[in-house]
Amino acid sequence: MGKYDALATLLLEAIKEGGDFTKDLSSIPVGISNRHIHLSQADLETLFGTGYQLTKTKDLSQPMQYACKETLTIAGPKGAIEKVRILGPARSESQVEILQADCFKLGITAPVRLSGDLQGTPGITLIGPKGSVFLSKGLLIAQRHIHMNLEDVKHFGVSDGEQVTIQVDGLRGGTYSNVVIRANNTSSLEFHIDMEEANAMHLVSTSRITILK
Ligand SMILES: [Zn+2]
């Protein structure tokens, strides 16, 4: 190994050991979500055709998650909403996350839930280019939450599943309580909130929030 190779190796190791040294743990980045859909592979194929694969257009901040080119119409007894974005990859169960105001348009009352907690949620119809699916459950309004890894858990002194209060700065700022910590080995530090709640406190994608506990 040459002198420069050795130096490069040392530098790489230093970077690795230092971890993500650009991460600022004094405040937490904000991710704002609009209404969106997660699909099972079976439902994806009913809606778009056999063997169909989603088309990624943009990586999201959480590992492996991405926005897709594909959209669907969602329909309830009172009305429909077009062009609802699909997020990939395919999941074991389909799920539709809407905004509170969408409930009036659709004519369905959806509960506030964490993603994946589908038991007892109402159903919804999905309409795609090649077919439609009636989901017997899976319609929810996302509960605000903070993704973090296990190092972040130690830093903030919180635990997975705990509910905390967060502070939003600014003229329309305030506090939001019942913010669920979602921690695992792979998550990136980010506060997730839907567009309605974000607008209420004038949160934008460049905003940062702090945990009050
Ligand atoms: Zn999230």
Image (cartoon, rainbow, N blue to C red):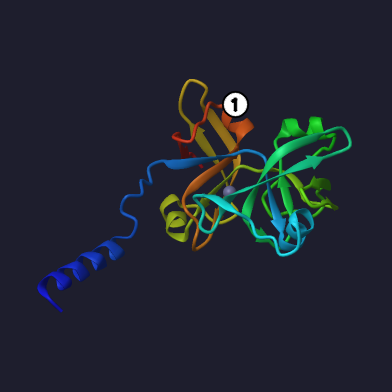
The extreme right residue here reads 77
Task: Answer whether residue 122 is visible to the viewer in this image.
Answer: no
Q: Nearer the viewer, residue 23 or 68?
A: 68
Image quadrant of residue 108? Answer: top right
Image quadrant of residue 75? Answer: top right
Residue 151 percent location from the top left of the image: 42, 59
Task: Answer whether residue 169 is visible to the viewer in this image.
Answer: yes
The extreme bottom residue here reads 1
The extreme left residue here reads 3
Pointer 1 residue: 200
Relative vertical location of residue 17 with respect to residue 201 in this rendering, above or below: below
Q: The residue under label 1 is which amino acid type? A: Ala
Q: Secondary structure at mark 1?
A: helix
Residue 187 percent location from the top left of the image: 50, 57
**At x 58% / y 28%, what residue is drawn?**
199
Relative vertical location of residue 165 with respect to residue 48 in this rendering, above or below: above
